[in-house]
Amino acid sequence: MNLTTIAAQLSGHSPVIQEPGQRGHAAVAMLIKQGTTSPEVLFIIRAEHDRDPWSGNIGFPGGRLNDTNESPQQAAIRETFEELSVDLRPARYLGRLDDLFGATMPVLVSCFVYHVTEPLTLNPNHEVASTFWTPLTNLLESERHQQRNFYYRDKEHSLPAIELLEPQQPLLWGITYRLIRSFFDICAIDFGFSEAEEP
């Protein structure tokens, strides 16, 4: 797996673009850089907040569109700057993943992939508890994949997840898991794990 192949696969992909209808519309940015052994991806851990449905979860920087005049990509750029003080405008835009509807939430999520080449200074705002980079290859290691029970909206769900951090730390699951699976599908890399729906 290398950035040249990733860029070629994403540039040749025609993303499935959906209309949100009566749902909310959010946009996120997937930031990739060249690591020591393989490309690495940036994740955030969202700060705990009663009004945030993704509170405490691993995800990508991003948030809801401001109004009908803001494009999803503009929202992803704006939210990344607000949350991390990272300006994506000079970064290399690689492509867009397929839009995804939340499985249990009335929201449409659009994801835009960027290759960042300059060293980044991350300054998380109050919405972000912490950040971390991890090699893309870590996401493919079978020993990190597991089925876990999550309590979401007063219901228990048995869902696939990826353990990227120490025990007792958040797992990667839900719509971010689905976006990662979509990314590997587009890049023609065998993800090889569950097709279950997640929030």
Image (cartoon, rainbow, N blue to C red):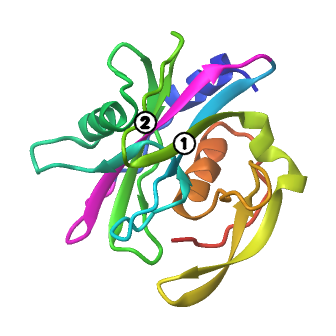
Label 2 packing within 10 angstroms: few (<14), some (14-19), many (20+): many
Name the residue located 36 percent from the left edge and 38 percent from the top edge.
83
- Against 188, residue 24 (above or below) is below
Name the residue located 71 percent from the left edge and 68 percent from the top edge.
160
Pinpoint residue 85: horizontal percent, then vertical percent.
36, 27
Residue bounds of the magenta highlight: 18-36
- SS category of the residue bearing label 2: loop
Name the residue located 27 percent from the left edge and 34 percent from the top edge.
78
Q: Which residue is mark 2?
A: 124
The disc, 2 or 1, on the residue closer to the chain's N-terminal end is 2
Residue 183 location, quadrant: top right
Is residue 63 toward the left or the right of residue 2 in the image?
Answer: left
- Against 72, residue 135 (above or below) is above
- Against 30, residue 58 (above or below) is below
Give amino acid for label 2: Pro
Give amino acid for label 1: Ser
Is residue 68 toward the left or the right of residue 65 in the image?
Answer: left
Q: Which residue is mark 1?
A: 130
Is residue 192 toward the left or the right of residue 27 in the image?
Answer: right
Q: Are marks 2 and 1 in contact (CB under 8 Å)?
A: yes
Is residue 12 in view?
no
Is residue 75 toward the left or the right of residue 12 in the image?
Answer: left
